[in-house]
Image (cartoon, coloured by chain):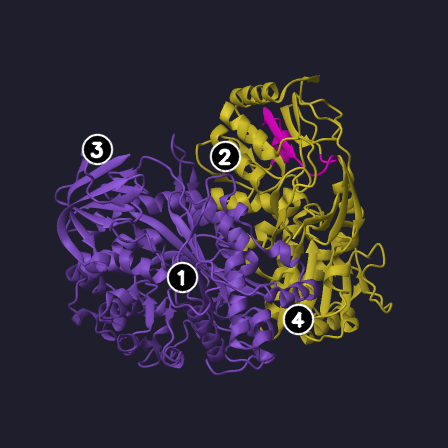
Chain colours: A yellow, B purple
Amino acid sequence: MTEMTEPGIWQEVPSPFCGIASDDLVIKVDGNDVTILENGDDITKAGFETAITDLSPRFNGRDVSLDEAVSHAAQLIRDAKQPVIGGLATDLNGCRAAMALADKSRATVDNMDSTATFRNLLVLQDTGWMTTTLTEVRNRVDVLLVVGTDIESDFPRFYERMVWNKESMFNQDIESRQVIYLGKTPSGDASTSPKGKKAQVLACDDADLPEVLSVLRALIKGKLIQAKQVGGLAVSDLEALAETLKQAKYSVVTWSAGNLDFDHAETSVQMICELVKDLNLKTRSSGLPLGGRDGAMTANQVSAWQSGYPMRTNFSRGFPDYDPYLSDSNRMLVNGEVDTLVWVSSFNVQRTPPQSLAKTIVIGRSGMTFEQEPEVFIPVGVPGIDHVGRTFRLDSVVSIPLRKLRDSGLPSTHDVLTAIENAL
Amino acid sequence: MLMKLTGGKIYDPAHGIDGEVRDIYVRDGRIVERPTDVKFDQEIDVRGKVVMAGAIDMHTHIGGGKVNIARTMLPEDHAADVVARTELMRSGCGHAAPSTLTAGYRYAEMGYTAGFEPAILPINARQAHMEMHDTPIIDKGGYVMLGSDDFLLRMMAANNDQEAINNYVAWTMNHSHAIGVKVVNPGGINAFKFNQRKLDLDEKNHYYGVTPREILLRLARAVKELGVPHPLHVHGCNLGVPGNLDTTINTMEGIEGLPMHMTHIQFHSYGTEGDFKFSSGSAQIAEQINKHKNITVDVGQILFGQTVTASGDNMRQHAAHPHAHPNKWVCMDIECDAGCGVLPFKYKDQSYVNALQWMIGLETFLMVDDPWRVFLTTDHPNGAPFTSYPHLIKLLMDKTFRNDVLSQLHPEAQKASHLASLDREYTLYEIAIMTRAGAAKLVGLADRGHLGVGGAADITVYTDNPDREKMFTTPDYVFKDGNMVVKDGHLIDVTWGTTHVVKPNYDISIEKQLKPYFDRYHTQKMGNFKISDDEISDDGRGSITVQPLLLGAKYDY
Ligand SMILES: [Zn+2]
């Protein structure tokens, strides 16, 4: 359990920032200063160590009390014809409060990472998938196929925690694990085994991935391929890859939808998921969608159980109305369809609202700076630093309890959104 | 606050009361003796009405990972069944996989005041409680799933003694806030990860060498010795496989007289006779249930229409995936702990197999003699959504109606069943047993499911309508902890129920084994796995109710 073992030193602190919810961080807290002493990385360092700046809410650029800020925010939402609650990077109770507010104010809900998340969700809703979770990977993976993704830049500790761990529960020789990249080339050496075995790389452009994946699937299904080359890769190399996957006892095919940044990438995700299903007719194989940083899974989970739908759901008719195209907040903002934007971003000061003509209320992490001052800015605490909370990690299965590490006096997103709802 | 319900016909099987006219007094959420002061804050005339305790659904998939996958993957399930926001209620939607808010409202409007999630993965328990926390009005709780978790199988492979296993089971129940223990396809979910595609009762897990029979015995014994009132809750081997009735009977006999609840028994009562190589095994199964007094069952009745099946049994769900309708499905391996599988499914009345499944369920209801040992479920949403319970009650209480429906089903299936010849009609008293008194006793709820003094004032009042479906669809009144929450079938107040748990004792030394296990193999620390009481009470509207253990439990530390 996260606990203070000596004054100011916290053990087993879970990270709500990194998607894989590493919970072995050792953290020093001195007043409002937070420092990771052990097991930090670029993502968690930025997450935990970013300093508090603003303590006071602002209305049109001037400091106001929290009550005033809340009532201005409520007024803007009351006056709105098409409000959007966007960003939605927060913890469980922040998301609960956002859903309640959306329901009452007939708003649309969306998450800042939906463009990536929906590359997966559209597949879930169309054909489904077979997936696995991090502890299974840690103990069982024998072949890891990484599709179109540079894991270590977004998930720096993935290999250390899930692939090159010291031991597996099933006496597997860890060194025998095979890592194969298809598409992007790894940016560093995280995928290299402890004894120096480098990952095999079958490099191709993102644009060629749809074709390469469909050939790989065809080969797995035993179909004959006439072409010798696809996307600059030798078909014989893909044949060997297909064979490796078929021979594997527990292969894992992973991708980060955020890295598959090309039009209709959902069809490539679908190809991955279908080839995993094909492999499972004979052996075991699982997909592993990476993502879920800054509460993205939490927002979709809470929305799904409270409304029946994931993000991109609109309450303007008094009931939840789901449309992944029409209720895409990016599209709505660009088209000028939104008159008021409530931007919720309690993890990362870099994640500020997109430029738009909408009146904007930011419920954001203290330390944010804006190119365009929002109408209302209410600085809030960070779940897992300033207040307790819970958040889901990338596999949507495991959630972690977040503790309060310091007493900054900043309110939680839940408290602010609930106050706004009550003021409507 | 003192309330009197005057002159109702009381059906309270826990006290042997079968339709007697009596008054009920409620003070501060509890049923009390007739008070000496006679100034009532509220008196409600229920003369001529049927009065029962609030109904309890002892097996309903209302919260947790696989339910939320079902919701997310089925927008088409919800679009035709949206619920608009009102002054009182949040909006929501969903037919087979409703949103949590809608599920709570609908249960209450049907006279249900408690529901128990039967498949809480330890590692996903936090989520199950989050979702149940957002389910209004009804009380809730759940059974924690063990039996395919590597920790237990390692203990068994290493021949740990029963004492150690009891400790582990009690520890898991405490820290996942469970009221019971469930096994799903014992060891089978684990074996699937080693690419085994079926696992019979005496078949060994390839890695651990452990059999389902051994797992069931170890866990049933643990539950008994810990004094947990709810017997081991078993989803057996070979779900849905023609011919599985032999395995089911072997499972009952193999448990050596220990208490065991066999869930959705309908899916485990299939023979292989006839042209379709699929036949009803309900007569043999019912005979065994009648014979073995340690066995309880719920039926898992199927009803026709579109639904979704959500199960921990990814081995069987994977095998069933060609039947997904529409054609999409999810299977997951989960955290060296368990797994899950989600398949949308449409039961068709002109399908021989589906029609016979319908008949097998009803035959089981009608042939099990003791209503204290058979429970009314559709395994929501696996056999049908819970909103179909009033229809199911009518099928049980009204033979003419039942045979009318039967006569319209697949003709070959009709020939394969002797359902038409079963004359039994359930009485209101028996319905009250199955859905109230018996369910409370089975789950281990000391203060629910009855109308005796000291009981919680969860009360449902119906108009005695010969159309039992109408009667059970729209109660006149529903009281939750003494508050009137439903009037004339409509919600008038929203309250938040409690979470029922048991807290069996354990020796803390089990953590000496568990902590290094988490550190070495898991991706979460043992301490962060544990769910605190604060997480259940959360924003203040949640609460924990600790139900008593059975007397004579082995451990009275
Ligand atoms: Zn079930």
Q: Mark 1 vs mark 3: which is more N-terminal?
A: 3
- Real-space CA distance between mark 1 and mark 4, rounded to the nearest whole angstrom: 42 Å
Q: Amino acid at mark 3?
A: Phe
Q: In percent of the image, x 64 and y 68: which residue is there?
A: B513
- Real-space CA distance between mark 1 and mark 2, rounded to the nearest whole angstrom: 38 Å
Label 2 belongs to which residue?
A100
Label 2 SS: helix
Asked if A15 appears above or below A30 in the picture, the reply is: below
- Real-space CA distance between mark 4 and mark 3, rounded to the nearest whole angstrom: 68 Å
Instruction: Report whether mark 4 lies on the same chain as mark 3.
Output: no
- Real-space CA distance between mark 2 and mark 3, rounded to the nearest whole angstrom: 37 Å
The quadrant of the rendered image in which ligand 1 is seen is: bottom left
Q: Amino acid at mark 4?
A: Tyr
Q: Which mark is residue A250?
A: 4
Locate residue B401: give its quadrant: bottom left
Q: Amino acid at mark 2?
A: Ala
Disc 2 to disc 3: CB gap under 8 Å: no
Label 3 SS: loop
Q: Amino acid at mark 1?
A: Leu
Magenta residues, start to end: A329-351
Q: Is residue A312 visible?
A: no
| Residue B312 relative to residue A245: left or right | left
Q: Position of residue A163 (x, y in %)?
A: 74, 64
